[in-house]
Amino acid sequence: MVVCVCPIAADVGVGVLKSGGNAVDAAIAVAFAEAVTWPEAGNIGGGGFMLVANGTEATFFDYREAAPALATKTMFADGKIDFRSHQSAGVPGTVRGMELAHKRFGTKPWKDLLAPAVKLAAGFPVDTPLAKRINDVLKDPKTTNAEFRRIFGREWEAGDTLKQPELAKTLAGIAEHGADWFYTGPPAEQLEAEMKAEGGLIRKSDLAKYAAKERKPLLGTYRGYEIVAAPPPSSGGTAILESLNILEQFNVSKHPRHSPETVHLLAEVQRRAFRDRAEFLGDPDFTTIPEHLTSKEYAKKLAMTIDMGRATKSESLAGTIPITEMGGNTTHFSIVDKNGLCVSNTYTLEMNFGSRIVVRGAGFILNNEMTDFNPIPGTTTRAGKIGTDANLVAPGKRMLSSMTPTIVRKGGKPYLVTGSPGGRTIINTVLCVLVNTLDYDMTPTAAVDAPRQHHQWFPDRISIEKSSTSADLVVKLKAMGHTVTESRQGDAHTIRIDPMTGLFQGAADKRLNGKASGY
């Protein structure tokens, strides 16, 4: 089964599985297909994480973008660098990441896995969600890149054919010659020329030096389930394990899922996990990550600071972090093959359509992932800006990410595969899906469809999704001292494997688009 945002890509993945490929083969095919069919976030010009596990083994592929050699710690401090500019792009990692995963787990020829993407780039029918997303971004006056407008610039309707010949040529080259061709051949030269022409920082030497990395996943437990989570430079796995460890100190299901008591408890847990995220988490090759963050003992101490009747003021948790007065887009897919190998993959361009810059001659969209670094050293604000040392810009450093690909195992077998887009909300979207499934025994569809909530320490507020109970809930949360806003949150494409029957239950998130495709 494959569950992802794009129905075409989901069917591409299932086609690989039907032909005898494994979950990683399918993931590679889906990732390259979505680079064509979901250009808002699918990419070869961005980066991400792939978590791979079966019942007993697990590994993690880090292909997060990195800062170029010309980047400096204070490059964003004056606020003058446009987040849609060439300077905002990090060194892309997706192609190297897919290559590394293929070397470790691939069973089908690399060229065969890219063939569907090459064919789709020659032309594919646009559906209603994609037409709307492209039309919306073209209406934005900040979408100024001439090449982007040349390729996408028209009024799109469902059924129109989107042709990307330059991207097709680039994908065909990667298929024929491998990832080295992308990082040292013509695309590298085209990207450097693009950067030099527009004041960007990436050079061919940055591309040649870039390496995807295989890391050990974080492992934890929650009420008898094993949680396989993303390690740094993802902040997601650490925050998820810290949150679950705190929740384990409470009888969560004592109250209804969307009762004031449960929403309050989750918000207090989220507040504390995000406070620690701000101080401690960054690229582990540059920053030492404290081991206590995911320990049960530390969680017990944090649980004791939660007042079940009153909201904690976020500023009271700041500790050594000074607070000042100053005031995206990603996609996830989940795959399980017939042998129980699971892939949870989240990758991104950062904002929707990334920098909205297409590399001339190469046809791919650049990320604007440099914006995920802390912009102003020493400046952490009540509005949500973070300025702690762990995630400041440095050449070759990978920016901290909230992407949270997650796999749950039960009794030594895969049980749940999930993840989501949504910037910092990703972590709490995944947390909500886990609580819905593991504490409240919801079906995958119910767990994914249920209203979500988010608290990220600063701004000091709960964001909840609107539901039939929202009005009364908001009143009660405010009485407890919370500030409450409403907003949509993520799209958590999820698969659950029924431990009794072995049936794969796929849930494509209704909030955006997608398909659970299987056989």
Image: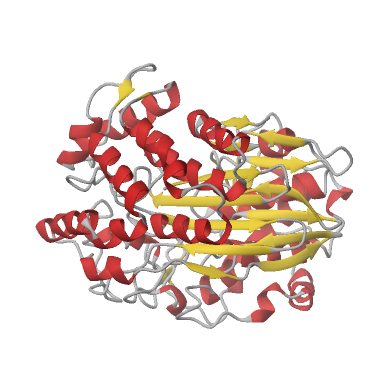
Instruction: Please say if 467 is above or below 21.
Output: above
Tell me the quarter of the picture where residue 385 sits: bottom left
Q: Position of residue 402 (x, y in %)?
A: 52, 59
Q: Relative to residue 42, is residue 515 drawn left or right?
A: right
Tell me which residue sits at (33%, 18%) in the image: 160
- The quadrant of the rendering that contains the N terminus is top right
Tell me which residue sits at (60%, 57%) in the image: 51
Tell me the quarter of the picture where residue 509 sits: top right
Instruction: Please say if 253 is above or below 228.
Output: above
* Residue at the limit of the structure toward the left, as seen here: 197
Tell me which residue sits at (82%, 62%) in the image: 248
Q: Position of residue 233 (x, y in %)?
A: 50, 68
Question: Which one is in front, 323 or 55?
Answer: 55
Q: Is residue 15 visible?
A: yes
Tell me which residue sits at (70%, 63%) in the image: 243
Tell me the quarter of the picture where residue 267 sits: bottom right
- The quadrant of the rendering that contains the C terminus is top right
Question: Which one is in front, 118 or 346?
Answer: 118
Q: Position of residue 452 (x, y in %)?
A: 64, 43
Q: How is the image coloured?
A: secondary structure
Q: Is residue 203 visible?
A: no
Question: Looking at the image, how many numbered discs can be counted on the residues?
Answer: 0
Q: Position of residue 204 (x, y in %)?
A: 22, 66
Q: Relative to residue 233, is residue 114 drawn left or right?
A: left
Instruction: Please say if 6 is above or below 79.
Output: above
